[in-house]
Image (cartoon, rainbow, N blue to C red):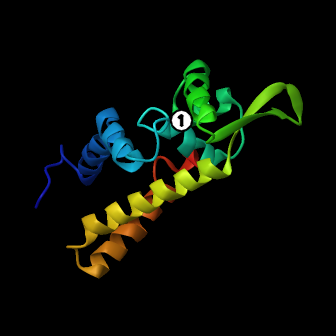
């Protein structure tokens, strides 16, 4: 398929990313990943758990910057997760005025379960692809994430 100069591969990728990054797409994915894992875990609280899994213990303000929510929203969602035993609050040893959010063992187990579901869903989606195509896609997606326009967004 030939592209006109006004519609490049960059546009195709940007369009696909736009679909993947839509709030409704993320909410649907989070709902699927968290189904049946407990009342406190849903498309609203999952980003808090997932963010903590990436960052490790951190303040609500720092976590909010990581996941794109304000501190107050993170705190409210963290309350639900704490009541369910999935995260705990503890003082920051470096600054006693700061409270850190941290996953409990149960919280880490929920994250592991959601990651297994996500991996299985991806495997299912790629099942009809030739194995070499799936491997190439995985390698090139990793390269795009590591070297592309979002490379500075992860550590």
Which residue appears at 48% of the width and 40% of the height?
Answer: 46
The answer to whether residue 80 is left or right of residue 140 is: right
Q: Quadrant of residue 91?
A: top right
Q: Position of residue 19 (x, y in %)?
A: 27, 42
Which residue appears at 63% of the width and 34% of the height?
Answer: 82
Nearer to me, 137 or 87:
87
Q: Quadrant of residue 88?
A: top right
Q: Quadrant of residue 129?
A: bottom left
Kindly tell me whether residue 130 is visible in this rendering: yes
Q: How many marks?
A: 1
Q: Position of residue 114 (x, y in %)?
A: 46, 54
Which residue appears at 26% of the width and 64% of the height?
Answer: 125
Relative to 106, does residue 120 appear above or below in the rendering?
Answer: below
The answer to whether residue 149 is left or right of residue 13 is: right
Kindly tell me whether residue 155 is visible in this rendering: no
- Outermost residue toward the left in this view: 1
Q: Secondary structure at mark 1?
A: helix
**Which quadrant: the N terminus?**
bottom left
The answer to whether residue 32 is left or right of residue 64 is: left
10 Å neighbourhood of mark 1: few (<14), some, or many (≥20)?
some
Residue under pointer 1: 67
Which residue appears at 29% of the width and 34% of the height?
Answer: 24
Relative to 45, does residue 148 appear above or below in the rendering?
Answer: below
Q: Position of residue 94 (x, y in %)?
A: 89, 35
The answer to whether residue 131 is left or right of residue 104 is: left
Relative to 103, does residue 100 appear above or below in the rendering?
Answer: above
Q: Position of residue 75 (x, y in %)?
A: 61, 24
Relative to 125, does residue 87 appear above or below in the rendering?
Answer: above
């Amino acid at each position: 398929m030939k592209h006109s100069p006004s519609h490049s591969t960059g546009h195709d990728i940007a369009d696909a990313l736009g679909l993947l990054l839509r709030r409704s797409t993320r909410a649907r994915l989070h709902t699927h990943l968290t189904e049946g894992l407990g009342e406190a875990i849903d498309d609203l609280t999952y980003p808090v758990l997932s963010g903590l899994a990436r960052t490790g213990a951190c303040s609500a303000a720092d976590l909010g910057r990581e996941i794109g929510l304000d501190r107050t929203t993170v705190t409210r969602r963290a309350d639900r997760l704490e009541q369910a035993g999935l995260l705990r609050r503890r003082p920051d040893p470096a600054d006693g005025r700061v409270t850190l959010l941290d996953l409990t063992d149960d919280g880490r187990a929920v994250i592991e379960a959601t990651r297994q579901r996500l991996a299985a869903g991806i495997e299912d989606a790629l099942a009809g692809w030739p194995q070499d195509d799936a491997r190439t896609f995985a390698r090139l997606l990793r390269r795009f994430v590591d070297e592309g326009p979002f490379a500075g967004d992860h550590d």
